[in-house]
């Protein structure tokens, strides 16, 4: 037999076959585990999606940082489908968009709703594209909580609070708010509101008095927003991609690349939404937000 007559040759052939098989398996694993490397060949437009309430800025920050440093990405599109959300997370994303904008172009694409904090982060982009019927604007700050002091009285429960200062339990759901506490919170809200206005002035290069006149919490259609200078162009997502490609110097039809799908993204979003609803319904903490709340 061949194995007996040529044992050394047979061993070499087996070793070679094993080596080829190993190369194939390793290549398959690399392709499977790192699809982003394959996707980022050539000139691309990166699409970063901001969907739902803005609660946790980290996923968006990580995507902006990654695509900002990726040579194959020539421009970015920030696709926004959000009524806004937390003040801090909105400001974090705004700052990161500005940082990215200094390196490569960023175009904001508004979907059905891009209001309050959703507009806040869009204002940092080089340009904004909205549909004529996009709900946007709602420039302002809102705080809300539930007071159930009368319910406690009816059931005979008396809350006991020991505090280090007069304002330590401001916004407590177990008692009515004092005039001094209302003034304190109003001052905080006014300051955050001015930060919102200043962010639009800086990002959009608009006069402060013009922005202030529009920043009373009202919503605008995309068509109205364009007439006020809050939006640059009317169009859909593809129009935003084409504009980003133009700004990024891409010739011809631009190819898009998305962040790799996070298997736990939906679960994490649902858990955050449930937690937020629970906190608000329980009324334990006043919520300061850049958020459009039609209901």
Image (tube, rainbow, N blue to C red):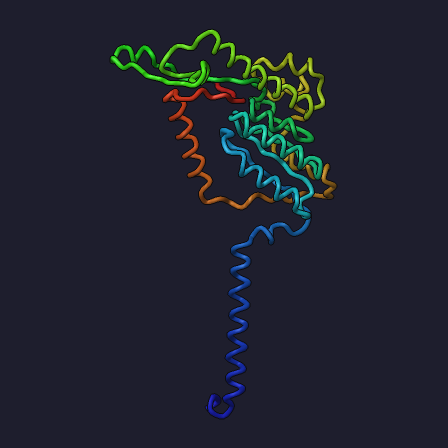
Which residue is found at the position 69% from the left and 31% from the top? 126
Give the image quarter of residue 193.
top right
Residue 285 or 34: which is nearer the viewer?
285
Which residue is found at the position 53% from the left and 39% from the top? 59
Give the image quarter of residue 152.
top left
| 27 up-or-down from 218: above or below | below
Residue 85 or 183: which is nearer the viewer?
183
Q: Quadrant of the C terminus?
A: top left
Q: How many marks?
A: 0
Measured as percent of width and height from the top left, residue 109 is found at 61, 31
Which residue is found at the position 54% from the left and 59% from the top? 30
Measured as percent of width and height from the top left, residue 281 is found at 38, 22
**Residue lying furthest bottom:** 5
**Residue lying furthest top:** 179
Measured as percent of width and height from the top left, residue 141 is found at 54, 18
**Residue lying furthest left:** 155
**Residue lying furthest front:** 164
Q: Is residue 41 left or right of residue 218?
A: right
Measured as percent of width and height from the top left, residue 211 is found at 66, 16
Which residue is found at the position 54% from the left and 86% from the top? 9
Give the image quarter of residue 95.
top right
| 28 up-or-down from 80: above or below | below
């Amino acid at each position: 037999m061949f194995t007996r007559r040529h044992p050394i040759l047979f061993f070499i052939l087996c070793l070679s076959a094993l080596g080829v098989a190993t190369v194939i398996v390793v290549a398959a694993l690399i392709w499977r585990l790192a699809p982003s490397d394959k996707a980022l060949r050539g000139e691309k437009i990166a699409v970063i999606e901001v969907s739902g309430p803005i609660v946790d800025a980290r996923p968006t920050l990580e995507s902006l940082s990654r695509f900002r440093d990726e040579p194959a990405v020539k421009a970015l599109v920030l696709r926004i489908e959000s009524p806004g959300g937390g003040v801090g997370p909105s400001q974090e994303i705004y700052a990161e968009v500005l940082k990215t904008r200094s390196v490569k172009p960023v175009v904001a694409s508004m979907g059905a709703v891009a209001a309050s904090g959703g507009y806040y982060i869009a204002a940092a982009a080089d340009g904004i594209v909205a549909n004529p019927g996009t709900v946007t604007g709602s420039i302002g700050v809102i705080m809300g909580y539930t007071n159930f002091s009368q319910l406690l009285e009816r059931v005979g429960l008396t809350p006991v609070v020991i505090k280090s200062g007069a304002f330590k339990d401001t916004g407590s759901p177990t008692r009515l708010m004092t005039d001094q506490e209302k003034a304190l919170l109003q001052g905080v809200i006014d300051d955050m509101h001015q930060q919102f206005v200043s962010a639009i002035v800086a990002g959009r290069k608009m006069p402060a008095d013009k922005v202030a006149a529009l920043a009373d919490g009202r919503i605008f259609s995309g068509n109205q927003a364009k007439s006020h200078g809050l939006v640059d162009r009317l169009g859909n997502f593809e129009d935003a991609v084409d504009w980003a490609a133009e700004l990024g110097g891409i010739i011809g039809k631009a190819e898009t690349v998305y962040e790799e799908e996070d298997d736990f993204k939906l679960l994490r979003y649902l858990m955050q939404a449930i937690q937020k609803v629970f906190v608000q319904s329980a009324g334990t903490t006043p919520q300061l937000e850049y958020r459009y709340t039609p209901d």
